[in-house]
Each structure stands twice: as C-alpha cells, then as structure tokens.
Amino acid sequence: MKFLMGACAALGICFITGGSNVFAASPETVCTGELAPGTYGRVVVPDDAVCLSEGPVTIRGGLQIGQDATFVLGDEDNPGDTGTISGGVHATNPASVQIHFTTINGGIDIQGGSGPFGGPFDMTWNAIEDNNIRGAVKINGYNGFWFGFIRNTVSGSVTLSNNELEDQDGNEYVSNTIKGNLTCFGNSPAPQVGDSEGEPNVVSGRKTGQCSSL
C-alpha cells in the first residue's frame, strides 16, 4: 500500500477535485464526480463513473457502486470522521472501493472486480480501512492490483474469498477487531501482514482458512 500511495502522489491524482457532477433527485443521488459534504438518500455510482469525497457525508439509503466504477471516501493519511453510510455498501465488478474512517450500518458486499489496471489512478485497489462496520462483510472475487482490509471494527462476520491480485504484497487483512467469525479462502496472494506493519486480528468467533494465523 505504501507503494500505491507513492505512485498516486507522483501522478497528482490521489484526490480529484474537478467540478461537482452530482445529480440529486430525492431519494436517490447519482454521483459522477465530487460528492460534497451533506446528507443524501441512496447514492449510486454508475458503471464506469468516478465518485470522490473527503466527507463528511451521511448516506441514509445505502451506497451502490457499478461495474468499472470508482468510489473513494476519505484518506488514510488524513484521519477524521468521514461520515455514516446506512443501508450498507454494495458493489458489483467495481474498479476501486476505498472507504476510510466511516461508520457503515448494514455491512459491505463487494462481488468481483474489473482488473488491475485502469480507472482514474491507472491502477485499481480496494482499501477498507479504519471503519466501524455494523453488519456482515463479504468481499469475493476482487481482481484489482491491491486490496487491504485493515484496522476496522466489525460487528458481524467477515468473509474474504477468491480475491486474486496483481501485487504480491496485496491481501493485507490485519489489525481488525471482529465480533463474529473471520473466514478466508481462495485468495492469491495468501492473506498477509505485508508492509502494513499491522497486528493480529482480534476475533471473538473463529478464524478459519487462510486467515487462521492472522
């Protein structure tokens, strides 16, 4: 992940602040640019779109991310409350889903990916970091460049499966507190600490599969 942030900074596109392209039609907002601080019903990021926000935002009707789409909320280098998403996070074949310092009510369900290269950063990665997640987490079949699930507090079970990444330092699943089970299988590379310098996960239930020793 340190490599990714360096590459992002070098490209000067870690956060795109171009004109706002948010189309609000209560109770649904379609985001294809900057998501400004505020309160929203359901937020939809359409196929191939990019939606970026520094927060804080309150999303009351769930977040839906489409195929080849990118959603970024917050930044690991700038700690602070970025808001609340109620209704869960749902994505099908996204390019990148990056959520930091957010309360997520309703869990996370990400299925598939769109390959390791492309999108606004020229490479794709999922970063679910420093969040308070209430509900189950299921991330399956992501095939981007890198993926980290780090420093989250989860009230529910977590299943991370079949995530096959380009970066051999990927699949960093560490420093989480999980009130439920942690299940990992079919991931390549195998789940690891990597360069995150993270700590073992604290899990109230069972650690099984590839995460049994993490």
Image (cartoon, rainbow, N blue to C red):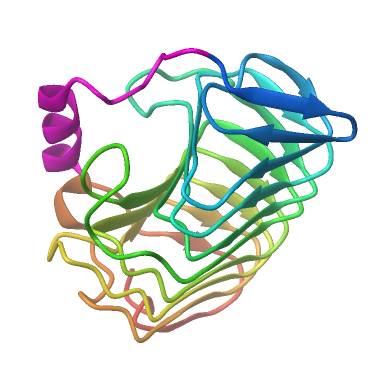
For the point 24% across and 68% down, the residue is: 165
Q: Which residues are magenta?
A: 1-19
Q: Please give the name of the residue rendered at 48% of the width and 65% of the height, measured from the top-left corner.
A: 93
Q: Is residue 178 left or right of residue 104?
A: left
Is residue 169 shown above or below 39?
below
Assess whether residue 27 is covered by the magenta stretch: no
List x then y, in percent, for residue 53. Answer: 52, 23
Compare residues 176 and 122 and report the one nearer the observer: 122
* Outermost residue to the right: 27
Which quadrant of the figure contains the N terminus? top left
Q: Is residue 118 left or right of residue 39?
A: left
Viewer-proximal residue, 183 or 64?
64
**Does residue 130 appear left or right of residue 148 in this picture?**
right
Work out which quarter of the rendered image holds the C terminus and state it. Answer: bottom left
In percent of width and height, residue 193 lies at: 23, 58
**Nearer to us in this view, 77 or 28:** 28
79 shown above or below 147: above
Near-viewer residue (130 or 68): 68
- Whether 140 is drawn above or below 55: the answer is below
* Residue in the picture at 42% in, 76% down: 141
Number of callouts: 0
Q: Is residue 18 left or right of residue 65?
A: left
Please determine whether, in this image, residue 101 is positioned above or below residue 154.
above
User: Residue drawn 22% across and 49% down?
Assistant: 123
Q: Position of residue 198 (x, y in %)?
A: 28, 48
The picture quadrant where one finds residue 206 is: bottom right
Percent position of residue 132, x then y: 62, 41
Is residue 10 rendered magenta in the image? yes
